[in-house]
Image: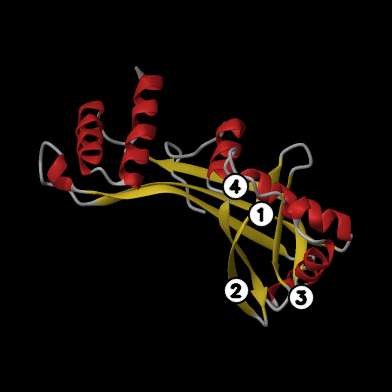
Amino acid sequence: MYIPKYYMIQDEEVIYEIINQHGFGTLFSYHNGEPFATHLPFDLHREEKTLYGHVARANEQWQDAVDQQVLAVFQGPHCYISPSWYETNQTVPTWNYVAVHVSGKLEIIKDQHTIVEVLNKSVAKYEKPESTYELKDVHANLLEGLSKGLVAFKIHITKIEAQAKLSQNHSVERRKRVIHHLEESGQYDNIQVAELMKKGLELKE
């Protein structure tokens, strides 16, 4: 993706944290000669440098995505930035956002045990600590039937690109104005972007 140098994220820890926090991504590949996308949760294995996931077996994307250089996109918080928040209106609106692109080769997982482990990791990640649900409590026959209806895969990561467009190209005073208006809005994404912008100011100051 196109990344101006002042928006580029190079810290690997920061990139991995974005993926973990916004793990519901989009898988892009070519299917029947055309771009194809599926929205699904991913599980990052940092030590292996892989992304694990699964799709419905009826989703034909997996059939020709094997060995393709696929792309997984993770979208963090994003919001509209109004010029009315600046000290002058002689400028144009923009959009602040955080995004990570992960490229790699896709491999289908055929081992049944590993498929169940992929599901287990999703449950462990997204169930709340106080939740009473555990995959091991699901009847073996039901679990086997469900797992046969999906295809698990892993992406061997070959490239990661990440950017945080957070008004870094504007003055500190202007960024503080933007943060103020974002926080006032009360909207979830706006507040998340404001928090990230404040962290950037702390590093700068």
Chain-order first, disc 3 or disc 1: 3
Mark 2, residues whose alpha carbon is within 10 Å: few (<14), some, or many (≥20)? Answer: some
Res 44 quadrant in image? top right
What element does badge 4 sit on? helix
Chain-order first, disc 2 or disc 3: 2
Mark 4 — residue? Answer: 126
- Discs 2/1, front: 2
Q: Residue at x 76, y 53 (%)?
A: 137
User: Which of the pair 3/35 is nearer the observer?
Assistant: 35
Mark 1, residues whose alpha carbon is within 10 Å: few (<14), some, or many (≥20)? Answer: many
Q: Amino acid at mark 2?
A: Phe
Chain-order first, disc 4 or disc 3: 3
User: Which of the pair 112/93 is nearer the observer?
Assistant: 112
Q: Quadrant of the C terminus?
A: top left
Mark 3 — residue? Answer: 63
Q: CA distance from mark 2 to mark 3?
A: 12 Å
Res 107 quadrant in image? bottom right
Mark 2 — residue? Answer: 36
Chain-order first, disc 4 or disc 1: 1
Above or below, 104 against 146 in this view is above
Chain-order first, disc 4 or disc 2: 2
Could you tell whether 120 is left or right of 78 in the image? right
- Discs 4/3, front: 4
Q: Amino acid at mark 1?
A: Ser
What element does badge 1 sit on? strand
Above or below, 107 against 117 in this view is below
Q: CA distance from mark 2 to mark 1?
A: 15 Å
Mark 1 — residue? Answer: 103
